[in-house]
Image: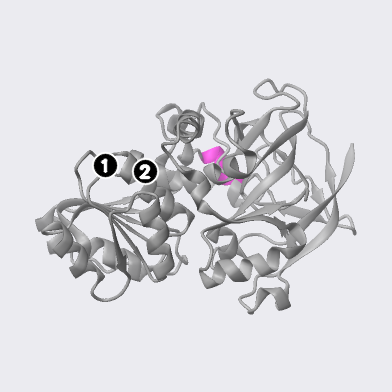
Amino acid sequence: MTITTKAAVLRHATDSHPFAESSPLRVEEVTLDGPGPGEVLVRITAAGLCHSDLSVVNGDRPRPLPMVLGHEAAGVVEEVGAGVTEVAVGDRVVCSYVPSCGTCAECAGGHPVRCADAQAANREARLVSGRRPFRDATGAELHHHLGVSAFSELTVLSPRSLVPVPDEVPLDVAAVFGCAVLTGAGAVLNTAQVRPGEPVAVIGLGGVGISAVMAAALAGAHPVIAVDTVESKLASAKEVGATHGVLAGQSAADEIRDLTGGGVAAAIEAAGHPAALATAYAATKVGGRVVVAGLPHPKHTIDVPIAALVGEEKAILGSYMGSSVPRRDLPRLFDLYAAGLLRADALVTANHVPLDDINTALDRLHDGTEVRQIITPNG
């Protein structure tokens, strides 16, 4: 079965602004092969526009092109292929962009984000089944984005990419759990393992950073210091649990050390920028943890004084997707949201952006004026 669907296709990476004029994402009528064995057809209700999407558009994160973009989303199962038992038609689901196999050494060891099978599929821009089910009007194959390709009315995924969403969670909120919340909260709870009373700083207040602030407050950290270049985001962070806001700049680390009497126990870098990581490292106390959750340009490196690293016993920890186990962590996070303890809806600062306006939304993301915008491919 072949289906017709509207999708946002990236054919050439560009950093030409404004995106509303250069139109790097073209909304096209494409065809989509129905789900094969071990695959699922999902109608996308809501898709978050993430900085990782912008990094593909502007070329910071090179991906095979042309590609149907989008990796943070929620929707409803429309059809299941042969052998699928994990989900059923009508299920409300959130997408995970690492479709872990569950059986390899990394998955069995509790680290599904390191699944070699999933990483190979994502690197090659295909489903874990090996297929690329999207075709353009000429019949040419389109690449899949992180196993999801959410900027489309319909998409085909592996059931390994799907986690059920409880009825208490609206799908436009559930979408941001798949990347922003899972990554930010996971960086605090899984990677840094923040304990009550520990001082924490979060540098970079996009969707991941705001989620990290919420998780730090939930974990009982104190103080929780939010850092960003945009003053309005500092106010947003205080609304969800930050005790202090510090404008990013040369004096930010000094301010953080003054506020904490020597530095934080854990600094979460969520900006994906070397300057943010330098601030995080400088603001961390002796014996503290620096958690790197932001994805920078691949050419960026860090310069760390090795003697200080040894003598001060600081730890620098990478955190991909919050070191999470999606099928374990997402249900817990949904429960916290339903109980009013995790205000994930505060991330959504621009709701219901039509697919046709996606390039204008990219401009807002580039300008840093929004935390999370929700693209609604089906209106």
Extent of the magenta region: 116-121
Residue 211 position in % (x across, y down): 43, 48
Mark closer to the chain start, 1 or 2:
1
The residue indicated by pointer 2 is: 215
Picture residue at 50% right of the left edge, 32% below the top: 338
Label 1 is placed on what type of residue? Val
Write the residue at 72% across / 34% down: 76
Q: Nearer the viewer, mark 1 or mark 2?
A: 2
Residue 86 image position (x, y, % from top left): 64, 23
Where residue 175 appears, as percent x and y from the top left, is 60, 44
Label annotation for residue 194: 1
Image height check: is 343 above or below 230? above
Image coords of residue 214 (percent x, y): 38, 46
Q: Real-space Cα distance between discs 1 and 2?
A: 9 Å
Magenta stretch contains residue 195 = no
Look at label 2 and name its amino acid: Ala
Looking at the image, residue 110 sits to the left or right of residue 196; the answer is right
The quarter holding residue 282 reads: bottom left
Q: Are marks 1 and 2 in contact (CB under 8 Å)?
A: yes
Most common secondary structure along the magenta stretch: helix
